[in-house]
Image: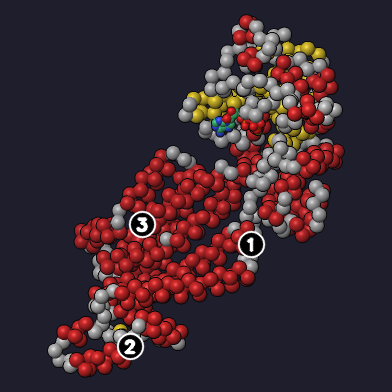
C-alpha cells in the first residue's frame, strides 16, 4: 500500500521550532555551568610559577569575570561563526576535540539503536499476537531482566565472560588500530560488539514491552476486524493493519528515550573505554574544562533535538492525520 | 423449497471469562434466503453482534469458542473450515459492515487503498485497476468527486460518508450476503435514512441478501421481509414481517412492538414509551426455563421447566413460548 508524502510545510514548521528549543537549552546549560564551582584557571591559582597579574590578565582576556549573560552572548556569537571555544586543558579547539570523538559515539549509539529496534519489533509483535503463550512469557521475562539490570552491570558481566574467561573479544576499545583492509574493520567490529550489545539490549528490553502493549492496543480496534473481514489473511492483517499503526507511538518513544540513550552511552563508554564524547565529557568535567563540557553537552542536546525532528517527520509520515493538521 | 443461502443451526458461541462461561449465543437458529432482507432485533446484549461475527468467524478465539451448532453457507458448514478457505468466502461471498463508521476504517491508508485491497485480492486485478474500480464503487454509493476522494484518508470524511465508504468496500466484490450490524445506530437521524435508502438502492442493483441487525422496529417494518427476534442468546420468534407486526406471539415481541414510538400519539403520551420492565438475564448462569420468565406477565410454572421449543404457529412463523 502506498504511503503519503509529508508536506514540506510540516517539515519547515518542525525545523523552525528547533531554533527556540536549542536556544533555551543552551541558556540553561550555560547558566548551570556558570553556577558550578571551579573554572579552568583554578589550577593556575595554585601554581606558584604564575604571578597573580598574569592570571588576572588571562582571566580578563578570556572574559571569565564578565557577567554570565555577557559570556553567554560571546559564546553564542562565536558559536554561530563556527567557533566552539578553546580547551585550556588539551590546548585544542573544542570543535576539533568533539569531531575526533563524535563518530565513535554515533556509530555505537546508532548500531545499538538499530539492534534494539531490530530485536524489539519482531519479538514484541510476536509476543502480542500470542498473548500469554510460552513465547510471550519468555520474552516478557527477558525484557524485564534486561530492563532491570543497569548497563554497568551487564557490561562488566560481558567483559568477565567474553574477554577474561573466553578471551574472544578485547575489553578495551582502541582508536589506533594499525591493521589495514578487512582486518581493520574486523578489529573495529570485534571491539564494538560488547558496547553495542550492552546498550542495544538495554534499550531493546524497554522497547519490547512497549511494542507489545502498543500492538495489543491496536489489535482489538474495529478496523482490524474490518481487515479480517476482507479475507486478506492473518499475516497481512498483522503487518499492514496492526504493526503499521502500532509503530506510531513507538517512534515517539524511541525519540523521547534519546536522552536516556546518551546517558547510557556515557556509562558504557566508561566501562569499555570507548573514546567517544561520553568519555570526553567525563574527563573534561573532572578537569574543570568548562568550554569542552559546554560543547559536548550542547552537541548531545543538538543530537537529541535532531532525533526528535526525525521522529516528528517519521510520525507525520506514518500518521496522515498529523501532517495534514 | 430451495436450500437457504445461510442456515445457522443451534449455534452456541461462548466466551470464557474470569467470572465463568458467558453464553452469549446459546442455540441460535436462523436462515436467510437468496436476495431477502432478514431483520434481527433484540435488546442490547442479546447476542446479535456475536451471531453476526460468528458467521464470518470474526470472534476472537480465545476467549470465544464455538460450543455447538452449524453455520451452513450454501449447504457447507463454515465452522470446521481452514483459515484460507474462510478467507476466500470473506468479502467475496459474505461481507459485513459495522456500527461505528468512525473507527471501522484504518486511519493510515486512503479509502481508495482500503477498498482496492479487497478488489485486488478477490478479483485478481492489479492495484491500478483495483483503484479505478474503487473509485467506481465510491461513485455508486454517491460520494461526490469519487476520482479525487479515493485518495483521501478516512479522517477527511464525515461519519455518514465513512459508512458509505464501508458499504462501497463491502459490496466491491458483489457478495451474496451483506451483514449490516446496526449500520445506522451511530449516525444522525437524517443520515440514517440516507444510509438505509442507499442500502436498498444497492440491493436493487446487486441483488444480495441482507442480514440487518437493528434496534429500530420501524426500520424493520420498512425494509425487511422476515424478522428474527432474539432474547438472551436465543431466537424467541421468527416470522414474515407482516405476521410479526400484525400478530406478534411472543410476549417479548409484543413488548418490543408496543415500545415503538408512535408519531400519531399525542405529544404527552409520546414521552412515556412502554418499555419492557426488568433486565436481560445474566448469561453466566441463565435460568433453566424460558429466559424471559422473570419479565413475563404470563409466566407460569411450566415456563421454568426447560427451554420451550420453537413451534410453528403459522406459515414461516415460529415462536418459543408455551402459550
Ligand atoms: N469477547 C467477549 N468476551 C466476553 N463476553 C463477550 C465478548 N463479546 C461479547 N460478549 C458478551 O456477549 C453478549 C452478547 O453481546 P453482543 O455484542 O452480541 O450483543 P448485541 O445483541 O450485539 O448488543 P448491542 O445491541 O448492544 O450491540 C454480551 O453479554 C457480551 O458481554
Ligand atoms: S414461555 Fe412463559 S414465561 Fe416465557 S414468554 Fe412464554 S409465557 Fe412468558
Ligand atoms: Mg451489537
Report the residue marked by disc 3: A202
Name the residue furthest top: B301
The answer to whether marks 2 and 1 sit on the same chain is yes
Is residue A166 visible in the rendered image? The answer is no
What element does badge 2 sit on? loop
Q: Position of residue B152 (x, y in %)?
A: 71, 57
Classify residue B61 by image quadrant.
top right
What element does badge 3 sit on? helix
Classify residue A155 by image quadrant.
bottom left
Report the residue at 37% width, 83% height from top.
Answer: A71
Q: Earlier in the sequence, mark 3 or mark 1?
A: 3
Q: Earlier in the sequence, mark 3 or mark 2?
A: 2
Pointer 3 with pointer 2, Cβ within 8 A: no
Give the distance between the C-alpha atoms of the residues marked 3 and 1, in whole angstroms: 36 Å
Report the residue marked by disc 2: A63
Pointer 3 with pointer 1, Cβ within 8 A: no
Name the residue furthest left: A48
The answer to whether marks 3 and 1 sit on the same chain is yes
Report the residue marked by disc 1: A325
Give the distance between the C-alpha atoms of the residues marked 3 and 2, in whole angstroms: 43 Å
- Residue A143 placement, left or right of B273: left
Report the residue at 30% width, 53% height from top.
Answer: A149
Amino acid at each position: 500500500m502506498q504511503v503519503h508524502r509529508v508536506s514540506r510545510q510540516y517539515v519547515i514548521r518542525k525545523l523552525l521550532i528547533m531554533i527556540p528549543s536549542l536556544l533555551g537549552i543552551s541558556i540553561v546549560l550555560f547558566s548551570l555551568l556558570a553556577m558550578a564551582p571551579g573554572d579552568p584557571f583554578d589550577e593556575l591559582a595554585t601554581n606558584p610559577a604564575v604571578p597573580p597579574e598574569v592570571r588576572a590578565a588571562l582571566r580578563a582576556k578570556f572574559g571569565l569575570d564578565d557577567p554570565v549573560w555577557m559570556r553567554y552572548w560571546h559564546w553564542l556569537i562565536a558559536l554561530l561563526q563556527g567557533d566552539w571555544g578553546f580547551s585550556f586543558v588539551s590546548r585544542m579547539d573544542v570543535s576539533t576535540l568533539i569531531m575526533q570523538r563524535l563518530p565513535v559515539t554515533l556509530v555505537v549509539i546508532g548500531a545499538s539503536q538499530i539492534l534494539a529496534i531490530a530485536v524489539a519489533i519482531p519479538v514484541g509483535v510476536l509476543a502480542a499476537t500470542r498473548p500469554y503463550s510460552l513465547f510471550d512469557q519468555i520474552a516478557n521475562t527477558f525484557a524485564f531482566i534486561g530492563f532491570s539490570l543497569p548497563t554497568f552491570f551487564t557490561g562488566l558481566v560481558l567483559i568477565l565472560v567474553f574477554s577474561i574467561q573466553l578471551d574472544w573479544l578485547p575489553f578495551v576499545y582502541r582508536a589506533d588500530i594499525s591493521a589495514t583492509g578487512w582486518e581493520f574493520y574486523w578489529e573495529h567490529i570485534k571491539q564494538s560488539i560488547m558496547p553495542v550489545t550492552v546498550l542495544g539490549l538495554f534499550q531493546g528490553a524497554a522497547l519490547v514491552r512497549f511494542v507489545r502493549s502498543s500492538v495489543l492496543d491496536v489489535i482489538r480496534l474495529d478496523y482490524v476486524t474490518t481487515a479480517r473481514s476482507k479475507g486478506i489473511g492473518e499475516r497481512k492483517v498483522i503487518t499492514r493493519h496492526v504493526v503499521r499503526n502500532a509503530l506510531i507511538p513507538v517512534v515517539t518513544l524511541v525519540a523521547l528515550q534519546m536522552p536516556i540513550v546518551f546517558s547510557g552511552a556515557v556509562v558504557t563508554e566508561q566501562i569499555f573505554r570507548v573514546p567517544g564524547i561520553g568519555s570526553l565529557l567525563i574527563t573534561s568535567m573532572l578537569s574543570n574544562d568548562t568550554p569542552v563540557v559546554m560543547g559536548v553537552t550542547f552537541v548531545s542536546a543538538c543530537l537529541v533535538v535532531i532525533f526528535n525532528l526525525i521522529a516528528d517527520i517519521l510520525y507525520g509520515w506514518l500518521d496522515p492525520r498529523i501532517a495534514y493538521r | 423449497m430451495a436450500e437457504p443461502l445461510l442456515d445457522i443451526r443451534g449455534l452456541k458461541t461462548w466466551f470464557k471469562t474470569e467470572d465463568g462461561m458467558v453464553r452469549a449465543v446459546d442455540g441460535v437458529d436462523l436462515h436467510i434466503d437468496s436476495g431477502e432482507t432478514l431483520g434481527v432485533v433484540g435488546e442490547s446484549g442479546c447476542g446479535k453482534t456475536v451471531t453476526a461475527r460468528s458467521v464470518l468467524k470474526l470472534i476472537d478465539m480465545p476467549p470465544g469458542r464455538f460450543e455447538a451448532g452449524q453455520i451452513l453457507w450454501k449447504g457447507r458448514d463454515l465452522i470446521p473450515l481452514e483459515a484460507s478457505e474462510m478467507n476466500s468466502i470473506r468479502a467475496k461471498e459474505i461481507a459485513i459492515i459495522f456500527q461505528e463508521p468512525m473507527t471501522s476504517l484504518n486511519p493510515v491508508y486512503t479509502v481508495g487503498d482500503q477498498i482496492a485491497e479487497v478488489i485486488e485480492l478477490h478479483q485478481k486485478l492489479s492495484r491500478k485497476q483495483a483503484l479505478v474500480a474503487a473509485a467506481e464503487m465510491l461513485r455508486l454509493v454517491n460520494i461526490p468527486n469519487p476520482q479525487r476522494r479515493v485518495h483521501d484518508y478516512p479522517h477527511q470524511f464525515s461519519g455518514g460518508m465513512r459508512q458509505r465508504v464501508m458499504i462501497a468496500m463491502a459490496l466491491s466484490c458483489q457478495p451474496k450476503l451483506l451483514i449490516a450490524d446496526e449500520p445506522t445506530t451511530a449516525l444522525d437521524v437524517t443520515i440514517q435514512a440516507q444510509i438505509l435508502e442507499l442500502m436498498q438502492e444497492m440491493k436493487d442493483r446487486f441483488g444480495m441478501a441482507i442480514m440487518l441487525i437493528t434496534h429500530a422496529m420501524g426500520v424493520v417494518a420498512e425494509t425487511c421481509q422476515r424478522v428474527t427476534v432474539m432474547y438472551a442468546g436465543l431466537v424467541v420468534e421468527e416470522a414474515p414481517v407482516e405476521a410479526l407486526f400484525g400478530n406478534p406471539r411472543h410476549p417479548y415481541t409484543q413488548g418490543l412492538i408496543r415500545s415503538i414510538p408512535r408519531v400519531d400519539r399525542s405529544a404527552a403520551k409520546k414521552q412515556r414509551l412502554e418499555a419492557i420492565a426488568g433486565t436481560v438475564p445474566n448469561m453466566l448462569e441463565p435460568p433453566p426455563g424460558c429466559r424471559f420468565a422473570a419479565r413475563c406477565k404470563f409466566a407460569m410454572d411450566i415456563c421454568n421447566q426447560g427451554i420451550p421449543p420453537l413451534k410453528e404457529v403459522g406459515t414461516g412463523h415460529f415462536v418459543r413460548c408455551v402459550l
